[in-house]
Image (tube, coloured by chain):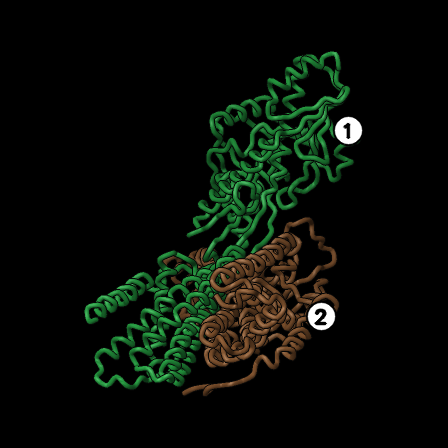
Chain colours: A green, B brown
Amino acid sequence: MKKNLRWRILLVLAVVALSVYLAYPPSKIPLGLDLSGGMHLVLQVVTDDALNAETDNEILRLQEQLKKENISYERISKSQERMGRFTIQNFDTEREGALRDLLDEFYKEWDYSVAGNEITLDIKPNVAFYLRDQAVKQSEETLWNRVDELGLTEPTIQRQGGPGGNRIIVELPGIDNPERVKNILKTTALLEWKMVTGGPAPTEEALLEPYGGVVPEDMQVVKGDPKRTQGGYYLLSRVASVTGRDIRMARRSIDQWNSPAVSFTLDPDGSRRFAKTTTDHLGENLAIVLDGRVQSAPVIEDRITTGSGIIRGGYTIEEAEDLALVLRAGAMPADINYLEERTIGPSLGADSIRKGLFSIIMALILILVFMVFYYRMAGVNAVIALVFNVLILMGALAYFHASLTLPGIAGIILTIGMAVDANVLIFERIREELAQGKSVLSSIAAGFSRAFRTILDANVTTIIAAIFLFQFGTGPIRGFAVTLIIGITASMFTAVFVSRLIFDVSYSKRKKRDKLSI
Amino acid sequence: MQLFKNPNIKFMKYKYIALGLSAIVIIAGILNINFGKGLNPGIDFAGGTLVRIKFIEPIPVSDIRQALATADLGASKIQSVGHTQTEYMIRTMQAKGIEAKNQDIEAHEIMGNRVVEVLRTEKSKEALASGKIDLNSADEEALALLIAQDFPEEAEEAARKIIAFRVESGVIASFDQIGQKIGVRNDIVNKLKEKAFISRLAVLSRESVGPQVGFDLRRKATQATVWALLGMLIYIGIRFKLAYGVSAILTLAHDVLVTIGIFSFTNREVNLPVIAAILTIVGYSLNDTIVIFDRVRDNLKILRKSEFQDMLNSSLNQTLSRTIITSGTTLITVLALFLFGGEVINDFAFTMMIGVVVGTYSSIYQSCSILYFWKKIFKPKKGMGK
């Protein structure tokens, strides 16, 4: 008995010491966004974009090949109803065999069906899935790059819903300039250099007047960014000679008039194309287009062979800095929809911590008063077990690196209320046994053993609910589920094992064993 | 001390009254939700923007409402936080001229921006336009850069102190505060007076949620509740008997329905924490029920001869003080949270309070009645024990 008691004491002390070690100082417990302040974003990658882009590319490729093979057709049209489908209309049926051979050899990723003089191509489902998946992966990577460039601490970027999912959750704790961060994450940052053939004109009609009001096939109309240019409309070449993808380095600098600008260096391949463009079009205007808006359209004054240059657009220092940042981090492969955004200021978080801690302390005091009042010395026992419970809970949170959220604090408070439940069950049983005239020691033993099954059943069901809650929730709610699960599990140890130990210790040493303060 | 000395209350006698009472509350709740005032979905479910703002001085609600009305945001919900009239939560509703496009939250964000915009004073707008920075929204880096123009040595330290103060108190009220309370040197304060200004408000938090999120949430919340109930049915079915499992699940469903019903008569909004509270009640309320069933199971062995109904009664009486005490301790802690936990967690605490009370009532008055009816209807050959 004595020996048995000793190792039990050691075990309890070891567990508590370990918990205190893990959780001290309390700053080791990571705080959730709602307590530390920060930004929570849920975004959706428009994966249709990736599929559309691929379809467009394939149509272009096919057009070239049909030309080469001399297979005539009326036109190729992209389906408006279904993603990844296009139709070759009115092709030369005499050349059907050749066309089939061509498709079999070069368009393995497409299914095709012939109906009269029409061929419809559908992208294979597994290819479509792969393209969508890649778009999300690349977006995730780009977000990581941007967050890294921003130098934020402990960001989390997580894809939701496995390989088929198109949502990404971004959590950025402790930022104090949400607007800037948001703008940086949000821009698509697709930069293109395109030749100017017309404009700027005040209206689209005026711009297209020389062309009879129709946009020429290899050109497109692009608006000027109202913040950077006079606004208006530009007529640009459809194909970009150089894009942001070719950029190797970008940094904030100043132009010859000392205004903020962004200087860039292209990779070797990009440099070659840039040199060719600037040679071929010397004296013409080259537009710099960012996310479909013309930033500036300077005249090419010189052949640029060094592969470096400067982007001007009347930027402020911060704007230039941020543009350089997103250019370094790369463009998004697809459009991004923002589904949810929550920004919690640090002062609100600090306020929540203060109030949460106060509630915990008040709950503890109220329970203590009640338990001691109702169960006397046994109540003190329960409160000691309760304090141990909270310590173990803190230690476990620190160990699992589980963030403490405001609902998590609510979980701790609730655990305090529910953990004494086990003690109450045991104490009520002991009282019943005592009332039946059993001795103190056997009443204690019977009380613990008979109540244990009930405690187990009751706690398992609560944990089942908490597990589903964890599955269902994000961020803060998960914090609640986690504290509840840990707290209840710990309460089985403290209320049963620790409480029993305290009873055993206090009654093994006592001579007079006929009275129990309960 | 003892709450009940050998209680002998004939709980089962009131089974029809209790059943009727519960039915009335549940039906009233369902009617109210479907045809009456209905549940009041918060931004988590309905989408929208919630901006929390702190002013440097008390501003009456009517002023805020008026300001918002001038920007077509008259339908916004304004809720005062605390009693100082300095802190408000503003939830924007659909506004004219801003069309929500598909699932993106851009429209909501524009509305959020507009709220902050119209609540600024003309003076602030002028100051912003002239390139001054707002001490109630500037970040530490920008502030340090500004101070560093004249005081490169002290800039970082001063900026850090000012921001720390703002985090502590939520808002900077005046330049005097910076000098006196924060202890920033006078010449730096003078520099700030020249290059910065103090707007009358600080944005404490801003949340925008798109419609898609709410839709998903509704689906997930329902799924989680149903799966949790199913999980418990199985667990109790294994540990006890199917009859107990079914009875426990019906009791739980009762608790959820009554809690939502009562909630629908309040003005509170349903947000994520409320759903979390309801799921917690699903887990918690079962505690009491299981303790009682456990006793029923024991008593079936001991009190073989007595009537089933009497046996249920004595089980309820034997566990009564425990049921009341643990509900009491949980209620105490939830009450502490409700009173001291602050605005953000208040709905959660409120829902939990209803749930704890309803759960206790149903454990006593419903769970055993259902067992009784089960025995009467199905007449299990092997009896109710295991």
Residue A128 found in image quarter: top right
Instruction: Tell me the number on the disc at residue A210.
Output: 1
Q: Amino acid at mark 1?
A: Pro
Residue B108: percent from left, percent from top: 65, 56
* Mark 2 nearby-residue class (10 Å; few <14, some 14–19, many ≥20): some
Q: Residue at x 53, y 41 (%)?
A: A163
Say whether residue A316 is left or right of residue B145.
right
Q: Nearer the viewer, residue B32 or A202?
A: B32
Q: Nearer the viewer, residue A355 or B178?
A: A355
Residue B327: percent from left, percent from top: 49, 76
Residue A258: percent from left, percent from top: 51, 43
Q: Amino acid at mark 2?
A: Asn
Tag 2 residue:
B32
Q: Chain of mark 2?
A: B
Mark 1 → mark 2, Cα distance in angstroms = 66 Å
Q: Is residue A153 above or below residue A283?
A: below
Instruction: Tell me the number on the disc at residue A53.
Output: none
Q: Residue at x 47, y 56 (%)?
A: A175
Q: Are marks 1 and 2 in contact (CB under 8 Å)?
A: no
Say whether residue B136 is left or right of residue A199.
left
